[in-house]
Image (cartoon, coloured by chain):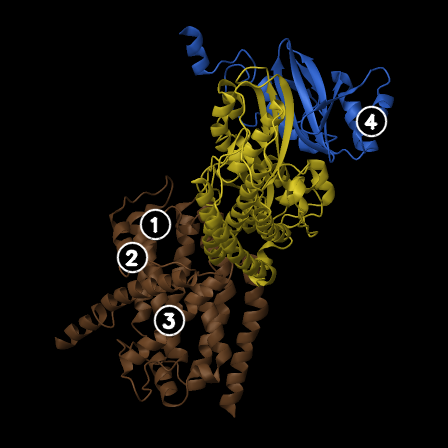
Chain colours: A brown, B yellow, C blue
Amino acid sequence: MTDLLDALAKLLLFPGFAFLFACAMLFAWIDRRVIARLQGRVGPPWFQPLADWIKLLAKEDVLPVGANEWACTMLPIFSLAAVLAASVYIPVGGWSIQAFEGDLIVVLFLLSIPPLAYFLGGWATGGVYSVIGGNRSLLQYFSYEVPFLMALCSPAILSGSWSIAQIAARQSETIWGVFLQPLGFVLAVVGLIGKLKRVPFDIPKAKSEIVAGPLTEFSGRKLALWHLSIETKTVVGIFLLVNAFLGGSGVTGLLPPPVTFAVKSMLVLLLLSVTSVLYARLRIDQLANLGWRVLAPLALLQIAVTVWIGVR
Amino acid sequence: MTTQITIPIGPQHPLLKEPLSFMINVEGERVVDSALRLGYVHRGIERLCQTKTYIQNLHLFERVCGICSHVHTTAYCQGVEALLGLEVPLRGLHLRTLMCELERVHSHLLWLGVLGENIGFQTIFMYAWRDREIALDIMEELSGGRVTHAGNVIGGVQIDISDEQFYSIVYRLNDLEQRVEKLLDVILHERTLRARTQGIGYLSPEEIRRYCVVGPVARASGVDIDLRRDSRYAAYGRLHVNVALAHEGDVWARTLVRAREAIESLRLCRQLLVALPEGPTRVRAPRRVPPGEVVSRAEAPRGELVYYIRSDGSDKPARIKIRTPTLTSLITVHDQLEGVETADISVVLSGIDLCIACADR
Amino acid sequence: MNVSQILAFLQETLPSERLEAQEMPINEQVISLPPQTLRPAVQALLEQSDVYHLSTITGQDMDGQIELLYHFWHGGGLTLRISLPRQEPSIDTIIDLIPGAAFYEREIVEMLGVSFLGHPDPQPLLLPEDWEGSPPLRREFALPEEREEEEG
């Protein structure tokens, strides 16, 4: 019985859904604040992402005539559910709800469901902007996903284990992955920017071209769920990178594990925020060029180097 | 995919600040055809002005456009002053020209921000509009209004500048020039911005001449026309204007031209202030205008602005015709959009610096 | 090229007309032409002089006739004045010579009811498609406030 209660507490509270929700709001606020300050503005107060989310819940839920209502209701739920399921296997501050050999593959698979749900959301609503945005999101997915997957396989090959908790533990004992595999870290960050559809890869939801892409016709609670799944995916993606390249919550000798983990997550978040200020939005063909001509070969190179080091 | 989709750009679209309708046919990610529909902001100003006196029309013409309001009244007042045979005092001409140049700076910075926003480079938008506040603050100090200044009157200007304001304004103009130089640096060297704007929307000099395009769009293709230097209206006869030219003819060239023009305008503002003569700023103008016709031209931020005024001897104009420069750029959009990628539609539409209120009147 | 040179070769092109240039402020020269000579005149200007920039085409309803003014710019202003009869005014289009005239001609079609022969697409430019009533710049068209003044 206590096992069940324990499991529920972990799932629902910490490091589960409630914690992730709080992190999603916090990370969204930090992101917006950092971007604002870099752009010479002040930025929103701490409760802004939460207030926006609550406001969306209260808005009227309208769908265009001819949209597939069942699909439009279920797709944001699928997207959020996949992200939350992926978070089960990612250790936070040393604690993870579940871990097993090979959970890295499961997490990567689960994290590739939200982009597909996003694309289907565009097609389910119909409308010019949504369809074009959906097409672009699929093209973008093919451009960044392969380098991202390969970049995340390198720490696994290096550490000799396919469990995220093990990778983090081994790295914190020996040396962080970012020092041994800097190229892999860079590729993973670039892939994460593409996954999260942040500038310069916010092509599917390019506001000045296709209004809001696949999410144009969503409103009210459905849109609130979409936004929550995007913000939670940011958190889960950052946690994944911290565990795969920055040694998770390994002891640095001075700080307790949760604080170390928080500091490392903030570093990755800052990296994401700063890159969204520096660049213009790319075109989809420029992204496809970048993905297949630059990123994928570099990722292959990274894996080759890792295997060579491992063999020796 | 060989099916064609029609993307409606407008009348409501995040890309447009004013309503305009472009129906763009795309095949896959390539534009095949486009259809333009104007008139959503048509207020019938040319007909309306016939029912109002010349002085009331000052108020009306300032509101043809929000961004280039001062140059509209400059062209109008110039024309009416020519019909009345008035000579505006030199101080008035300097102040009138000063506001024209400040307006050019604020318009180009506004446009740079809009271009940045439309290519997803929000940082440029924030920086450009923050720097634009300096120009708007100066205009507000001089005239009391940030956007519509009511500075021009028939016979001169009704704004003036005191000695304390003089030093503060020159200091701020220097500061603004440094900031615009930094923005120019970004335009020249930032790779993603160049990747999005280079090679898009090319217009050859022959097309410019055939479509009678004016303004920065023409100068970006190497066609050297600038009414400030060619017509020497207002106080431009006393200034040497360096016209910014480029030869690539694409949206990046237009960005360069506008940024360089903004820096040149700041230089001209300083010259006008330093050489500001003493004396009155206006002369009295009678209410009735003797019969006659006049064609008055001015260089708005977007190009050549033409006012044709005919008076029949009463205190109301018989006919006023306005031709705004945005119309000349809109004709070229159909050609510019041929074969362009969908993502570049926003770049092309931003590159021509739309001022739809001007085009519709 | 100054105006006397322009006047000279225009006179050559149109020997049957007596052309003279009048001055108009600001820095504008006006030459009056009969409607049927507009196209040959514009063609001559484009081929033989440095005049190519059409600033705009003004249309106005004068007493008894519709007047069209073609404003050119070549470092100085040059205006060609054409008078058309009020009943069914029409003139040849110059859109094939100067494509930039397209919007100006369309505006005159809808505002004054002039027809431009040979214009490929004379749709209204600014007025809505379902506009009923006379062209707005004609004298017959009265604004609501003007109608009130007449009644009151």
The answer to whether marks 1 and 2 mark residues whose Cβ atoms lie closer than 8 Å is no
| Secondary structure beneath label 2 | helix
Q: Label 3 belongs to which residue? A: A238
Give the alpha-carbon distance from disc 3 to disc 2, as whole Å. Answer: 21 Å
Q: Nearer the viewer, mark 1 or mark 2?
A: 2
Give the alpha-carbon distance from disc 1 to disc 3, as whole Å. Answer: 28 Å
**Residue type, label 1:** Cys
**Residue type, label 3:** Ile
Along the polypeptide, which appears first: circle 1 or circle 3?
1
Residue B247 spot, x, y in % from top left: 70, 51
Do marks 3 and 4 share a chain? no
Name the side, left or right, on which B324 lies relative to B110: right
Mark 1 falls within which chain? A
Q: Label 1 belongs to which residue? A: A72
Q: Label 2 belongs to which residue? A: A48
Rendering quarter of residue C108: top right
Query: How crowded is the residue under tag 1: few (<14 C-alpha within 10 Å), some, or many (20+)?
Result: many
Do marks 1 and 2 share a chain? yes
Would residue A232 be seen by someone viewing this image from the given angle? no
Query: How crowded is the residue under tag 2: few (<14 C-alpha within 10 Å), some, or many (20+)?
Result: some
**Residue type, label 4:** Ser
Along the polypeptide, which appears first: circle 3 or circle 2?
2
Mark 4 falls within which chain? C
Name the side, left or right, on which A250 lies relative to C17: left
What's the mark number on residue C4?
4
